[in-house]
Image (cartoon, helix red, strand yellow):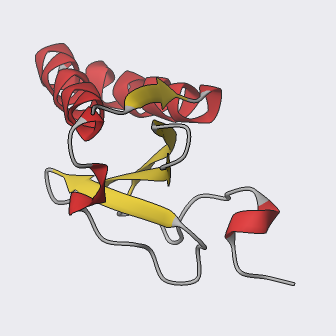
């Protein structure tokens, strides 16, 4: 049975910001990258466990597109749901903020 994939507002804002920066230099590359990231996210409807868990981020998994662009997501097996949380340029100094309950902090 397939999972439903939801793109959270945080992911959409991250993606929009990232693609605006790229589009300023190369609009075609921005469109291609955006399509690639969204298609990879949508593909999580089938076997979302294929990507690794992120250390110190309880339950969060990550895939990487084109070496630098990290996409963070959660799987809710009971609800058959994949929530795509953030999209981040890995060349930045740190990973994005995630909800406190996902960081492993107490």
Find residue 1 and report its image quarter: top left
At x 20%, y 27%, the residue is: 39
**Residue 19: x and y, percent?**
35, 26
Q: Nearer the viewer, residue 103 or 33?
A: 103
Indicate whether 105 appears above or below 16.
below
Q: Nearer the viewer, residue 70 or 83?
A: 83
**Residue 14: x and y, percent?**
52, 35
At x 20%, y 36%, the residue is: 40
Judge left or right: residue 17 versus residue 23.
right
Judge left or right: residue 69 versus residue 56.
left
Say whether residue 68 is visible. Answer: no
**Quick one: which residue is furthest to the right in this view?**
106
Find residue 64 and report its image quarter: bottom left
Indicate whether 38 appears above or below 53.
above
**Residue 74: x and y, percent?**
51, 52
At x 27%, y 28%, the residue is: 42
Query: How many numbered discs sit on the rendered protein?
Result: 0
Judge left or right: residue 54 versus residue 99.
left
**Residue 17: x and y, percent?**
49, 29
């Amino acid at each position: 049975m397939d999972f439903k994939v939801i793109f959270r507002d945080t992911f959409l804002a991250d993606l929009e910001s990232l693609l605006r920066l790229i589009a300023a230099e190369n609009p075609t590359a921005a469109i291609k990258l955006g399509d690639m990231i969204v298609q990879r996210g949508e593909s999580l409807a089938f076997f979302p466990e294929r990507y690794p868990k992120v250390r110190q981020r309880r339950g969060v998994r990550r895939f990487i597109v084109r070496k630098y662009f990290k996409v963070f997501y959660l799987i809710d097996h009971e609800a058959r749901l994949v929530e795509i949380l953030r999209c981040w340029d890995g060349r930045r100094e740190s990973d994005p903020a995630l909800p406190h309950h996902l960081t492993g902090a107490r």
